[in-house]
Amino acid sequence: MATTDDAAPEKLRDQPFTLAHWGATLPERDLTPEEASGPLSDEEQLQLAECHRAVDNARSAQWLLGRALEIVRRRRLYRGDGSRTWVQYLAAEHDGMTERDARRLQEEWRLAKAVQDALGKPAPASHVRAMLDYADSTSDEQAARAYVMLRAAFEAARMRLAAHQITARVAKALEPAASEKDPHSRRQAVEVRWREIHAPQPSIPAPSKPSEGTQPSTTARETTDPLADAVNAVERALQRVDDALMDASAAERRSTAEAEHLQKRLRKVGRILAKATVSADDVIDAEVVEDEGEARG
C-alpha cells in the first residue's frame, strides 16, 4: 500500500515569471540620500532594468490572459466534463471574473500585442483601451504605429502621456472617418489627421500680474477658475482610479473587507460629485450682453 509520501504531488502550472527568474534582490533597509546619491552605477542600472522587466511582464500577462480566454472560449475548452458553462468556468478558474471583464480582455489583447511589437515593450492597459476606437476604424497595426508616434512625441517634449490625452486625440482623428465609406480611404484620412494632431500642445503661460498702479482689465478673463482646476484634478484622479482598478496584483492582495470599504468610499465620492452644481454670476452675464449690444450699436 502506498504511503502518503509516495503519493504523486499535485502538478502545478508552469510559472513563466517567478522570483527564481529574477535577478534583483530586496535590500534589508532603505538607503539614505547620502548612501544613494549621484548617477546610478552599472549595478544599479541592472537592478532597475530587472524591476522594469517585472513591470513589463505584468503588462504582457494582461493581454496574454485575454488571448488565453479567447482560446478557451472559442474552442469550448471550458466545458470540463462536458457540462460546465463559460460562466461557471470563469467563476471556478478565474476567481469569479465577470463575462464583461472577460470580453474586454479578449477585445483588447490583439491591439496590446501589436503595440508591444511596435513599441518594443508593453504599454499600460489604459493606453491600449484609449486606442481601441482608432484600431476599430483602421487596424491594430495602424493604431499601434499611431500610438508609438504619439508616445515618442510626448517623450521628446518630456511630457507625461495620459490616457485622457490619447482619447481626445483619437476622437479628433476619427472625425474624417465618418464621411469615408471606403476602408482604405478611411485609414488614410485618419492617419493624415493623426499626424496633424499627435504632437503635444505647448503649455499656455500663466498671465503676468499687473504692475502696481494699473487696473486689471474687466473684460479679459485672465484669472483661472479654481473650479476648472479642481475638475482637472478630479479627471486626473479618475484616471488613477481606473488604472488602479485594473491592477490585478493589488486585487489579489486586497481582502474582501478592504474591497467593500473602498467600494463604499468610491460610491460616496460619486454621490458628492453627482450633487455638485456649477453656478455663474448673472451680473457678469448681463454685463457681457450689454457690452455686445453696445458694440453692435
Image (spheres, rainbow, N blue to C red):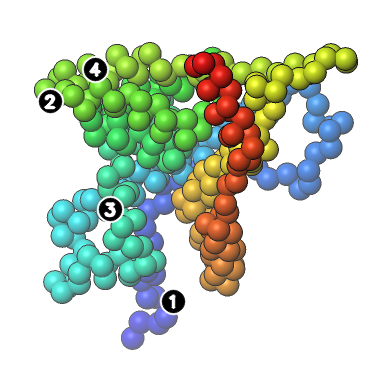
Residue 211 occupies quadrant: top right
Local crowd size for mark 4, using a 10 Å CA cut-off: few (<14), some (14–19), many (≥20): some
Whole-Å distance between the Cαs marked 3 and 1? Answer: 43 Å
Task: Judge whether 14 appears above or below 183 on screen.
Answer: below
Q: For mark 4, what is the residue?
A: 189
Local crowd size for mark 1, using a 10 Å CA cut-off: few (<14), some (14–19), many (≥20): few
Quarter of the image that includes the N terminus:
bottom left
Disc with the residue nearer the chain's start (4 vs 1): 1
Disc with the residue nearer the chain's start (3 vs 1): 1
Q: Is residue 75 visible?
A: yes
Q: Are marks 4 and 2 in contact (CB under 8 Å)?
A: no
Whole-Å distance between the Cαs marked 3 and 4? Answer: 30 Å
Disc with the residue nearer the chain's start (3 vs 4): 3
Q: Position of residue 222 (x, y in %)?
A: 67, 23
Left or right, residue 167 beside residue 239? left
Q: Secondary structure under badge 1?
A: loop
| Residue depicted at 35% across the width and 82% down the height | 2
Q: Is residue 122 visible?
A: no
Q: Are marks 3 and 2 in contact (CB under 8 Å)?
A: no
| Residue depicted at 26% across the width and 67% down the height | 87
Q: Are marks 3 and 4 in contact (CB under 8 Å)?
A: no
**Mark sitting on residue 5:** 1
Task: Judge whether 26 appears above or below 189 on screen.
Answer: below
| Residue depicted at 50% across the width and 46% down the height | 243
Q: For mark 2, what is the residue?
A: 181
Q: Position of residue 288 (x, y in %)?
A: 58, 28
